[in-house]
Image (cartoon, rainbow, N blue to C red):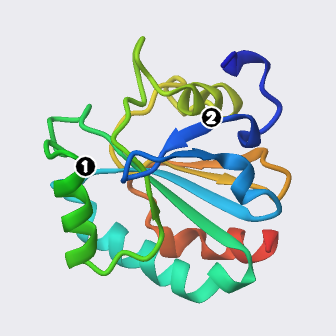
Amino acid sequence: MDWKSAKSIYEFNAADIDGNEVSLQKYRGNVVLIVNVASNCGFTKSNYKQLNELHEKYAENGLAILAFPCNQFLGQEPGCEADIKEFAKKNNIAFDMFSKVNVNGSNAHPLYNYLKQQKGGFLGSYIKWNFTKFLVDKNGVPTQRYAPNVEPKNIEADIKAML
């Protein structure tokens, strides 16, 4: 897939946590929050809890949260998909989990190349840490990028405005 010419996230596919190929067309018409996650990060507990709260509060109104595990930051997501799935189950995660991806470098998932191209970061377009968040409108276009230290609860107003 040529991510450089993509017009929306709907042009991408990604493997879910069970290895099934998912077209992001599935999320057409939803506000989407895309997050690179890790099970062993200092931000994990609060982010997973708050992401789950946002999911519970707004999923019926059209919010979709897509979590992409990534092990590129100090090896904080070392497990395989089965381990990640078990972690999510223990934490009652109800939003959509995908298979582990790279978000930076030559093997970065095309979706992340697209997101970084659309919404560069403060010190460059690369992803700097776990729990970088991209808010995508109902047309599949990224509108906001949030740093890892921005807690999900602090973007609730932006989500509500887009719903």
The quarter of the picture where the N terminus appears is: top right
Residue at 68 percent across and 85 percent down: it is 60
Q: Quadrant of residue 84?
A: bottom left
Say whether residue 142 is visible. yes
Q: CA distance from mark 1 to mark 2?
A: 23 Å
Seen from the viewer's position, the closer of residues 157 and 73 is 73
Residue 152, above or below 40: below
| Quadrant the C terminus occupies | bottom right
The three-letter amino acid code for the residue at tag 1 is Glu
* Tag 2 secondary structure: helix
- Categorize mark 1 by other alpha carbons within 10 Å: few (<14), some (14-19), many (20+): some
Return the x and y of residue 133 as percentages of the image width and height. 52, 51
Do tag 1 and tag 2 residues touch (Cβ < 8 Å)? no
Give the residue drawn at x 65%, y 55%. 135
Q: Is residue 91 above or below residue 137?
A: below
Judged from this view, the residue extending furthest toward the top is 106
Label 1 or label 2, whichever comes before in sequence order: 1
At numbered mark 1, what does the secondary structure look like: helix, strand or loop?
helix
The tag on residue 103 is none
Q: Residue at x 45, y 50 (%)?
A: 16
Q: Along the line of sight, which residue is nearer the eye, 157 or 92?
A: 92
Rendered location of residue 11, percent (x, y): 74, 35
Q: Which callout, 1 or 2, points to the residue nearer the camera?
A: 1
Residue 125: give x, y in percent of width and height. 54, 25
Q: Which residue is at a point 14% across and 42% down the rendered structure image?
A: 78
Q: Does the image show residue 39?
A: no
Q: Is residue 129 left or right of residue 78?
A: right
**Would you name the residue on which mark 2 appears?**
115
Residue where numbered disc 1 is placed: 81
Q: Amino acid at mark 2?
A: Leu
Query: Is residue 14 toward the left or the right of residue 80 in the image?
Result: right
